[in-house]
Structures are given as C-alpha cells and as structure tokens.
Image (cartoon, helix red, strand yellow):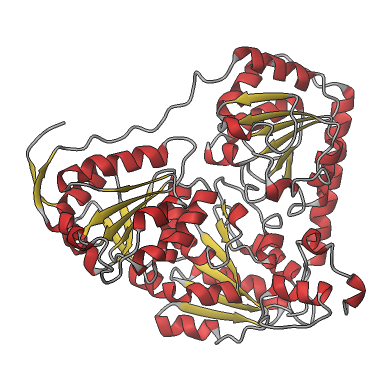
C-alpha cells in the first residue's frame, strides 16, 4: 500500500469506493454523512443517485448488484432512523445473496452511550441482516474497512454488508494508505473429480433425467454450461421459483419453474424423474414447501451447491457435490463425452415437449382479450406479446406477481428479479430502477400490486430526476390480494384491512413528470404496454384488474381452518 493520501474521512470513503470500481452510489443525504456527500460532489467517475427512502434505495442497490454482477453501494447519511430504515432492504438482499455494501453515518464518538439524539446501536442492529457489520475505529482505517466490506460482500456465498462510520471520523482530516481493489473469487479447483464421475454414471443410467437449476446457474451466468449438459443428456431443465431466467426460455428443453409457485408440467417432471440433478439450488421453501408434494421421493438426487451446509439439508441426497454450478456442469459434460441417451430418455424428453407446448397454448387461449374486467391471464399474455426479447422483469411478492413469474418470457438471462424467499412487498419498482442503471441498454419492466406500489411510489421522483426510463405495471385490484383471498377462503369472508383505496396512479405519474397510462379493457393492454415501453421516459401503467380474481397460494398454512365457513 502507498502512504500519503490526505483529506477528510469523507474523502477517504469516496476514494476507497473509486478504487473498488464503483460507478453508482445510491443514497439519501443526512447530517451524519455530509462529508461523504461533499466528497462525491463534482466526481465524474461516480454517479450519485439520490433516493426518497433508505429502504427503497437499498432495493435499487440490490437490483443493480444482481443485474451488474458487482457490488451495489448505498450511502445512508443519517444515523438512527436513517439506519433503521436500512434493515428491510438489507434483509431482502441477504435472502437473495446480493452483494450490497451499505455505508452509514453514525453517532459522534463523544456521544455514544449518552442517550443522544437519534442514538441506536447500529452495529448490533445491522449484524442481524448482513454477512458482517463493522464500526470503523479510526479515520485512517476507513479505506481498509471498506476494502474488507467489498471482499466480504463479493466472496461466495455473496451477501450484504454494512459499515458504520462516526460523524467525527468522517469530518476528521487524516492520512491513509491507498486501498487495493479486491479481485473477485475465481472458480476452479474445489470439485472432486471422483464425485463428478459418480454423478456422470448416475445421469448416464437415468431413464427419466431432470436438471433442476437454481440461483447458482443464474447468478453464476453459466446457462451455456447447463444447456450443454441438458442437450447431451436430453434432460429437461426446470428451475426454482424466482430463477425462471436461469436459461433462455426459447430453448426446447426449457420447462419453467417447478413447485407450488411454478407450472404443472415442470412439477410433474420433478414428481416422476428418477435422477434429479439439483444444480446450484438449496431445494428450499419456494421450490418445495419442504414436502415431497412436488418432488419424487424415490428419485436419486445429485445436489450441487456452493454452500456445503445446504447439501442434503432439506432432502436426503444420493450424491452431494460442493462446487460452483458452471464448473460442475462443464465437468459433467467432459465426463459424459460420447454419451447417447437411451430410447426411454428420448421418449421422456419428447413427451415433455408435447405437454409444454400444450401448456403454452392453453395460457395463450386463457389470455385472449374479452369483455368484462381484466383478468391476470390477459395481462400476462399482453406482456408476453408486447415485451421485447431483451426485457428484464422485476416483481413483488403479491399473488399476482407470484402467478406472473412462470407466465412471462425470459429470453436473455438474467431477466427476472424477485424477492425470492423473503417474500417482500414494495420491492419491485425500486429494484427495477437499479437494474436499469446496471443495464441501461435493456428494457426493464416492473410488476407490482397497487398496495406495494403505494409503498414505493415516491421513487417516481427518483426515476424522473435521474431519467431512469423503466416501465412499472401496477396491477390495481384495490386490495391486498393475498390476504383478502385468505379471508375469503378460510375466514368466512370477514374482510378487515384488505381493501386499499388508491389515487389514479397514471395521474400521479404525470404529476411527478413521468408518463402515465391507464388500462380498463383487456383489448387495450398490449398496445398501451407497447406505448409505455416506446415512450423513452419513466412510465407507470395503471391496470384495472378484476378485484375478484383472487388466489390463495399458501393453502397449506390454513389447513387447520374449517373451510365449511368459507363463502367460496
């Protein structure tokens, strides 16, 4: 390291960010971090994106990190409430293993433990939702600690981190050593050749082979390796929910998402396969609900995971391989060179293709425009038709979004960004703004319910001020749809707190300076969505969805209820 850099602690923060290749900093100004914001002033190499709320700002950094494949940085300028607002965003990033680096101003060192204004134990608070949290002890160590933060966030398994810096340290003039850019962890050398050979033998003798791809394939950007293996085996590829973009949807072996939040064809494959290669997936909650309802109890499971503690955690496996999904897939292709699928496998794969084609035809038929209130299937069909092949979709966790995840087309991975197992509402729009900044050349479409959009609609101001041209489709049914469905199906239609009065979101968008669109008829959906995409400005499309089109996803949670009381 080189000696001799001098300036305020705020200067040290910004110089450390620059060393680590930071191009965008999302943040909300506050008095505890003013020196950092001042150090960012006039920088041409780092773009500051000012947000309206710390939670949504972290969602932007999260979306940026997932789409760009590098750390997303958020700067919380206010100690106390500015930091408590980070918790939800960091918890969401943790659930997605997203490398977010949060930097927060904190209480002056002289005021700690004095019940000072906005005092809270930020170290203890953020430790629960991050891989690691630091409180910087000396101003001269700021670049060192920020370097540690980047290293920790980007080292598998990736995840969010937080750095607290007291406001007096940020104001202090200090001398520091130059930081050295962290080089991301490189794959290779971790996988046992013997285990690869064993897995290859199991797959070669399978009569009904299936690949179940997860975040390890998607985040590892190794679709080509997974597809090469699938083609060699003639094995369909299913995906865990939220990772339906792990491979391009146009491939003939693409089966879509498996499990209770997937589709019936993919789930039937998992129920009947005799050998399942779980490639880069934990076989967790969203995929299985921890039951064999969507997984063949008698299948031989080969589980490939970067996290060794995930192997066999929820389901016993025939063979576990600790390694990176792409590395293992390439190793299996090498081990299976010359393999010829047996006639039973060809029949299995061919039967899947027929069922998949029938499912797609059925969806298009169900989504045909008709008179009456707009049905979710009609919106999904319009999105499939109007969205260009480069589209990237972000979604919330409401039931309309959960149904949409397997309904849309993902041509160019990565193309789908969801709350995953955290199940967060209010995530999608802000995430989409971060995704667009990471991939400005691509189309970004965010789907939200009206309740979730109400939580985050102030970020229209960020989109307009920063000219971030995403399209947000608000599926407006005037209620908290999931909860209203449960009240209908399991609580005798006793509705309380379920209905949500909303302003006209298209008009709200125009008041902010964005483009606003409203759709009341299914016949207009495709043309309006296409117009929103083409307008080249931040756009909100307020879609009036049938408020009676409700669906209970978590029926398993209410098995104890007496359904005879239901009105449905």
Outermost residue toward the front in this view: 114
Relative side of 359 to 389, left or right: right
Along the line of sight, which residue is nearer the eye, 97 or 223? Answer: 97
Q: In x, y percent, where is residue 28?
A: 31, 66
Image point (49%, 21%), residue name: 188
Outermost residue toward the right in this view: 564
Relative side of 374 to 419, left or right: right
Along the line of sight, which residue is nearer the eye, 231 or 54? Answer: 54
Q: Report the quarter where the C terminus lies.
A: bottom right
Along the line of sight, which residue is nearer the eye, 217 or 175? Answer: 175
Relative side of 496 to 340, left or right: left
The answer to whether any part of residue 20 appears in the image is no
Quadrant of the rendered structure where residue 34 is?
Answer: bottom left
Task: Tell me: residue 360, above or below residue 329.
Answer: below
Image point (34%, 32%), residue name: 183
Q: In x, y percent, where is residue 461?
A: 39, 75
Image point (46%, 45%), residue name: 159
Q: In x, y percent, where is residue 351?
A: 88, 38
Q: In x, y percent, where is residue 243?
A: 62, 47
Task: Tell me: residue 1, above or below residue 61.
Answer: above
Task: Tell me: residue 450, above or below residue 154.
Answer: below
Quadrant of the rendered structure where residue 54 is?
Answer: bottom left
- Number of numbered labels in the structure image: 0
Q: Report the quarter where the N terminus lies.
A: top left
Task: Tell me: residue 473, above or below residue 240.
Answer: below
The answer to whether any part of residue 473 appears in the image is yes
């Amino acid at each position: 390291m080189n000696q001799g850099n001098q300036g305020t602690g705020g200067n040290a923060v910004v110089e450390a960010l620059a060393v680590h290749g930071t191009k965008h900093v999302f943040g909300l100004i506050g008095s505890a971090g003013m020196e950092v914001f001042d150090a960012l002033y006039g920088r041409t190499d780092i773009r500051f994106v000012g947000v309206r709320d710390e939670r949504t700002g972290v969602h932007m950094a999260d979306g940026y990190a997932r789409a760009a494949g590098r750390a997303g940085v958020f700067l919380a300028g206010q100690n106390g409430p500015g930091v408590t607002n980070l918790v939800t965003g960091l918890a969401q990033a943790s659930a997605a293993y997203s490398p977010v680096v949060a930097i927060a101003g904190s209480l002056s060192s002289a005021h700690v433990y004095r019940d000072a204004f906005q005092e809270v134990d930020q170290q203890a608070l953020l430790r629960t939702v991050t891989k690691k949290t630091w409180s910087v002890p000396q101003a001269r160590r700021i670049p060192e600690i920020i370097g540690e933060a980047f290293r920790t966030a980007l080292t598998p398994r990736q995840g969010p981190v937080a750095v607290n810096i007291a406001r007096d340290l940020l104001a202090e003039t200090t001398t520091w050593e130059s930081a050295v850019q962290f080089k991301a962890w490189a794959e290779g050398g971790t996988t046992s050749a013997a285990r690869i050979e064993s897995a290859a033998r199991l797959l070669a003798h399978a009569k009904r082979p299936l690949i179940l791809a997860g975040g390890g394939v998607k985040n590892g950007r190794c679709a080509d390796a997974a597809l090469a293996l699938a083609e060699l085996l003639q094995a369909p590829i299913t995906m865990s929910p939220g990772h339906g973009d792990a491979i391009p949807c146009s491939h003939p072996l693409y089966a879509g998402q498996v499990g209770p939040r997937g589709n019936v064809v993919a789930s039937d494959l998992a129920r009947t396969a005799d050998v399942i290669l779980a490639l880069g997936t934990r076989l967790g909650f969203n995929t299985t609900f921890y039951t064999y309802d969507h997984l063949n109890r008698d299948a031989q499971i080969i589980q490939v995971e970067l996290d060794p503690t995930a192997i066999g955690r929820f389901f016993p496996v025939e063979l576990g391989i600790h390694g990176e999904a792409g590395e293992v897939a390439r190793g299996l292709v090498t081990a299976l060179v010359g393999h010829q699928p047996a006639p039973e496998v060809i029949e299995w794969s061919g039967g899947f293709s027929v069922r998949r084609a029938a499912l797609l035809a059925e969806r298009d038929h169900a989504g045909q425009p008709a008179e009456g209130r707009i049905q979710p299937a009609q919106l999904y069909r319009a999105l499939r038709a109007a969205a260009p092949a480069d589209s990237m979709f972000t979604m919330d966790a409401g039931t309309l979004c959960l149904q949409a995840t397997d309904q849309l087309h993902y041509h160019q991975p990565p193309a789908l960004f969801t709350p995953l197992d955290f199940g967060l509402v209010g995530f999608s729009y802000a995430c989409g703004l971060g995704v667009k900044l990471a991939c400005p050349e691509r189309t970004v479409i965010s789907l939200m319910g009206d309740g979730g959009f109400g939580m985050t609609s102030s970020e229209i101001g960020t989109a307009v001020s920063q000219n971030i041209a995403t399209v947000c489709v608000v599926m407006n049914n005037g209620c908290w749809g999931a909860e209203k469905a449960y009240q209908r199906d399991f609580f005798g239609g006793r509705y309380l707190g379920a209905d949500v009065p909303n302003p006209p979101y298209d008009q709200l968008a125009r008041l902010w300076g964005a483009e606003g669109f409203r759709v009341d008829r299914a016949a207009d959906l495709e043309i309006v969505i296409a117009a929103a995409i083409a307008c080249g400005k931040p756009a909100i499309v307020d879609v009036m969805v049938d408020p009676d089109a409700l669906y209970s996803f978590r029926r398993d949670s209410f098995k104890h209820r007496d359904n005879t009381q239901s009105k449905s």
